Amino acid sequence: MAENRLKKGNFHQSTQYSIRDPRSATGIFDSGVGGLSVAREIMRQLPAQPILYLADQAHAPYGQRPLSEIRALSEGITRFLLAQGAGVIVIACNTASAAALHWLRRQFPDVPFVGMEPAVKPATTHTHSGQVGVIATAATFQGELFASLLARFANDVIVHTQVCPDLAPLVEAGELSTDRARAAVRGYLTPLLATGIDQLVLGCTHYPFLRPLIEEVVGPGVEIIDPAPAVAQQTGRVLAQRGLPVTAQRPAHRFLTTGAPDRFRIALHDLLGLTAAVEPVRWDAASRLALLSSS
């Protein structure tokens, strides 16, 4: 656990990319199934909007990878989603948002991006104790995005951070209520609770799927803040501002993974209650994504 005041990183601009089809799907990506918590909220708030979801499970979890690698992966995924018809890109991964959001906006200046950010602002607004907890990956706390949030909103409160490297892999493995998951959640949250926090920010999109365990540990005196509803609202605003219509009466969602489609299909059903085909995609030697024939 730590109290963070982080330095901003340096990023470099490269090639540009323009949207070719304004009547497009909402592209969403994450390292795995965590971003489904965001997709769920977007589908709830924008039920007519087609979703194009890509899980880069071949590289999951992103949390302990170098920032430069996360940026390269995020760029490859963005190019693929645009080629598949995405008109807006939602980075449904706090780690990728922290590492690559500002950089991607420079790389693709004509593409609207919506990123995840730990909900520091509402937490600092709602706190009565002046003590706020944030749980996330190490890469999220190292990124320029989190540092800017602290500088803007955490002047009058103490923000305690806790890196939770085991939680996302537990969700990926489908361990949402096992003894191992319960022990991990308790181990990470106990030091935060000892500081007197009354707000807990879920700084990784995997964590909402562990919310019952988190609530069990923190009790009723701590408000849990999930940024997914705010991200869905921002996605709707971006679609409206860019004139990207949401007119499909029965949107055709697509789900893709760089991992095992059968495994992702099970997770999709278990986490969202959806039964859908999952398309396999693979990285090539040039760090580009390509669709494979479904088995």
Image (spheres, helix red, strand yellow):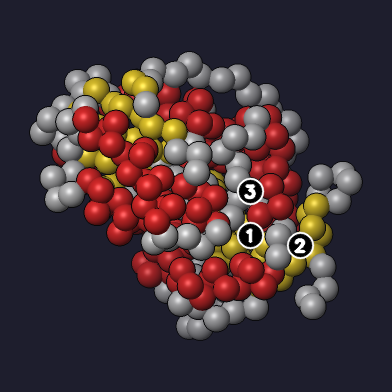
Can the viewer see residue 82? no
Disc 2 and disc 3: Cα gap in Å?
15 Å
The answer to which quarter of the image holds residue 241 is bottom left
Q: Is residue 82 left or right of residue 196?
A: right
Circle 3 packing at 10 Å, graded few (<14), some (14-19), many (20+), is some
Can the viewer see residue 39? yes
Q: Position of residue 261 (x, y in %)?
A: 69, 69
Q: Is residue 201 left or right of residue 55?
A: left
Say if mark 1 contacts mark 2, CB within 8 Å: yes
Secondary structure beneath disc 2? strand
Secondary structure beneath disc 1? strand
Q: Nearer the viewer, residue 294 or 245?
A: 294
> Residue 148 bears which disc, if any?
none
Disc 1 and disc 3: Cα gap in Å?
12 Å
**Of pointers 2 and 3, the one earlier in the residue sequence:** 3
Q: Position of residue 32 (x, y in %)?
A: 59, 55
> Residue 281 bears which disc, if any?
2
Looking at numbered disc 1 in the image, what kind of residue is underneath it?
Leu
- Looking at the image, which residue is at 34% across and 35% down? 134
Compared to residue 284, the image places residue 85 above or below, namely below
Q: Is residue 292 left or right of residue 85?
A: right
Q: Nearer the viewer, residue 79 or 182?
A: 182
Check disc 1 and report the residue beneath it: 54
Check disc 3 and report the residue beneath it: 60
- Locate the C terminus by quadrant: bottom right
